[in-house]
Image (tube, rainbow, N blue to C red):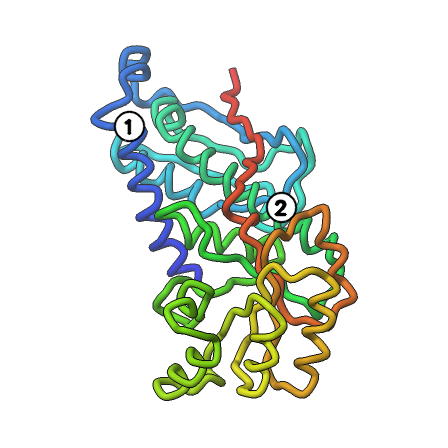
């Protein structure tokens, strides 16, 4: 995704977040300060090791608040998205009015904390798998309204993006297939409507996989298969042109067990569903 597209997404994401947090005005800051030109210097500091992500959203929070207060805010980044951050390191410097800093602080931090959490976790999966031939994919298990920024964080962490939504890829899953009397009926009916070599199809067992391999779909998704079942599935698909994806109950504790398998993708809902935010602090210099 282009930087210009990310900025458009950030504008929308941040706008909603600021409305949620600010409402009509910051009651506390409004009481404390009369001078809007009370310029301060602040730093964001990492309180734990991480992979940094979310600069565009952080910047946009300050952009929107400074426009609201008709002031200025300068942010100097000391680290970039994708860089490893160590506990105690400063990641950026902010020079702005105290009012702008205090009003934008929480929204800006919320984004980099969440997105850095996703990029950091993704990077852990990539390093533990330690196989460049297998791509780790995200899923649609995202926070409503924040899918694109979460998927951006996955890429920053070294992962890859699966489909963005229901609109950009055909993927038949268990509940689609259950509409038919049998897996064979599903195949026979579906191939009349679309070329199966253009779609992804999920299978729940080796029996259905044996049927599916004959049709060479674009991608075969093995859902909740054990290691031994995956190995059998790979043999069944040995003459197929389909790529192989696995999913279901993948965690940091077991990702390493898939390293030696001849598969193409591992899709992991944990990347964006179970977000563990990184702790950052914004401190104003006295």
Nearest to the observer: residue 94 or residue 175: 175
Q: Earlier in the sequence, mark 1 or mark 2?
A: 1
How many neighbours does mark 2 have within 10 angstroms: few (below 14), some (14-19), or many (20 or more)? many
Q: Quick check: 260 left or right of 188?
A: right
Q: Is residue 142 visible?
A: yes
Q: Is residue 37 above or below residue 142?
A: above
Question: Residue 15 at what x, y percent from top left?
Answer: 29, 41
- Pick the residue in front: 4 or 121: 121
Quick check: 19 above or below 41? below
Q: CA distance from mark 1 to mark 2?
A: 30 Å
* Mark 1, secondary structure of its residue: helix
Residue under the point 34% across and 42% down: 14
Percent coordinates x, y for residue 27 in the rendering: 27, 16
Q: Residue at x 41, y 56 (%)?
A: 6
**Quarter location, residue 237:** bottom right
Q: Pointer 1: what residue?
A: 22
Residue extending furthest left? Answer: 24
Q: Nearer the viewer, mark 1 or mark 2?
A: 2
Q: Residues within 10 Å of mark 1 (few under 14, many from 20)?
A: some
Residue drawn at (53%, 57%) of the image: 138
Residue denoted by label 2: 121
Say left or right for 133 vs 94.
right
Q: Residue furthest front?
A: 181
């Amino acid at each position: 995704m282009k930087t210009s597209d990310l900025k458009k997404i950030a504008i929308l994401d941040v706008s909603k977040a600021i409305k949620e947090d600010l409402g009509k005005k910051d009651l506390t800051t409004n009481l404390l300060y009369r001078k809007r030109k009370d310029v301060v210097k602040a730093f964001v500091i990492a309180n734990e090791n991480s992979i940094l992500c979310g600069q565009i959203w952080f910047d946009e929070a300050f952009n929107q608040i400074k426009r609201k207060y008709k002031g200025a805010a300068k942010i100097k980044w000391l680290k970039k998205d994708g860089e490893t951050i160590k506990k105690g390191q400063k990641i950026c410097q902010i020079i702005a009015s105290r009012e702008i800093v205090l009003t934008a602080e929480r929204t800006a931090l919320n984004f980099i904390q969440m997105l850095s959490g996703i990029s950091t976790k993704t990077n852990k999966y990539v390093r533990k798998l330690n196989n460049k031939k297998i791509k780790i994919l995200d899923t649609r298990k995202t926070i409503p309204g924040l899918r694109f920024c979460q998927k951006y964080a996955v890429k920053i962490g070294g992962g890859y993006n699966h489909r963005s939504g229901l609109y950009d890829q055909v993927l038949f899953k268990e509940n689609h297939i259950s509409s038919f009397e049998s897996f064979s009926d599903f195949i026979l009916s579906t191939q009349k409507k679309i070329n199966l070599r253009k779609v992804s199809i999920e299978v729940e067992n080796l029996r259905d996989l044996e049927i599916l391999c004959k049709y060479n779909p674009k991608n075969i998704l093995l859902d909740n298969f054990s290691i031994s079942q995956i190995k059998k599935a790979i043999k069944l698909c040995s003459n197929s042109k389909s790529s192989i994806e696995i999913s279901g109950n993948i965690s940091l504790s077991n990702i390493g067990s898939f390293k030696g398998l001849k598969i193409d993708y591992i899709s992991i809902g944990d990347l964006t569903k179970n977000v563990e935010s990184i702790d950052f602090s914004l401190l104003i210099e006295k």
